Amino acid sequence: MEPTPTRRRSPAWTLANCLTYGRLVAVPVVVALLYWPLENTARFAALGVYILAAITDYLDGYVARTYDQSSALGRMLDPIADKLLVAACLLMLAADATIHGWTLWAAIVILCREILVSGLREYLAELKVGVPVSRVAKWKTTLQLIAIGFLVAGPAGETILPGTIQTGTYLLWIAAALTLYTGWDYMRAGIKHVIDDPR
């Protein structure tokens, strides 16, 4: 009698991937809560969901490395979830004027860099060339997430910590400056492969 084969769990449902799915689900939830920008309860709820989503950004990678749960699906979805969360928050914060005036340029720089790097990574993937994440890029991501967190708290945060919006604005400008640096760094690393491609 042959032994019953052990059913293996689909790699799509590892803990690391489930954390990434949670970040994807958090995007429309944060957007919906930010539709009531002057309601403190909604802003704090949006901040809570945002913080949980930001934490999963670090947890999913840690879990994948520690428990050998890396997968092609996870590598594809992780940067997509990050960019959707950042882009959706920046657009909603611009819509309710938490981000306004010259600070809109910081948000534009961040969004344009994300599109640029995504396009570059996609092209280089066809050439089987990887673009490693630099330490400065990790700092940029951390600072960017913290800045957006302050801005998501927005007027509600001002009732507890005066200067919340101003702090978020300053941090967003610093993140934008690091974004320009890391964007150029990625371009410099990848442009050689683009120029040398014979196709």
Image (cartoon, rainbow, N blue to C red):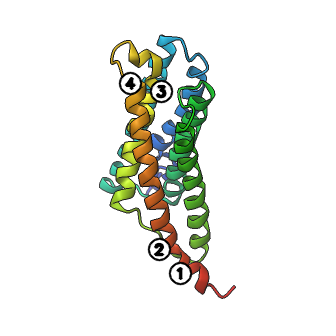
| Mark 4 neighbour class, 10 Å CA radius: few under 14, some 14 to 19, many 20 or more | many
Residue 23 image point, x, y percent: 49, 38
Of the numbered discs 3 and 4, the one sitting upstream in the chain is: 3
Closer to the N terminus: mark 1 or mark 4? 4
* Separation (CA) of disc 1 from disc 3: 39 Å
Label 2–label 3 contact, CB within 8 A: no
Disc 2: CA contacts within 10 A as few (<14), some (14-19) or many (>=20): few
| Location of mark 4 (residue) | 164
Residue at image position (69%, 85%) is 199
In space, the residues marked 2 and 1 are separated at their CA atoms by: 7 Å
* Image side of residue 10 versus residue 62, left or right: right
Q: Residue furthest front?
A: 102
Residue 143 sits in quarter: top left
For label 1, the residue is 192
Q: Amino acid at mark 1?
A: Lys
Q: Is residue 106 above or below residue 157?
A: below
* Relative to 135, residue 108 above or below: above
Q: Which residue is mark 2?
A: 189
SS state under label 2: helix
Q: How many marks?
A: 4
**Sequence-wise first label, 1 or 3:** 3
The answer to whether one can see residue 99 in this image is yes
Nearest to viewer (mark 4 / mark 2): 4
Mark 4 belongs to which amino acid?
Thr
**Residue reaching furthest right?**
199
Residue 47: x %, y % from top left: 44, 25
Residue underneath mark 3: 152
Q: What is the three-letter code of the residue carrying label 2?
A: Ala
User: Relative to residue 55, is residue 3 depicted above or below?
Assistant: below
Mark 2 near mark 1, Cβ–Cβ under 8 Å? yes
Earlier residue among tags 2 and 3: 3
Disc 4 from disc 2: Cα separation:
37 Å
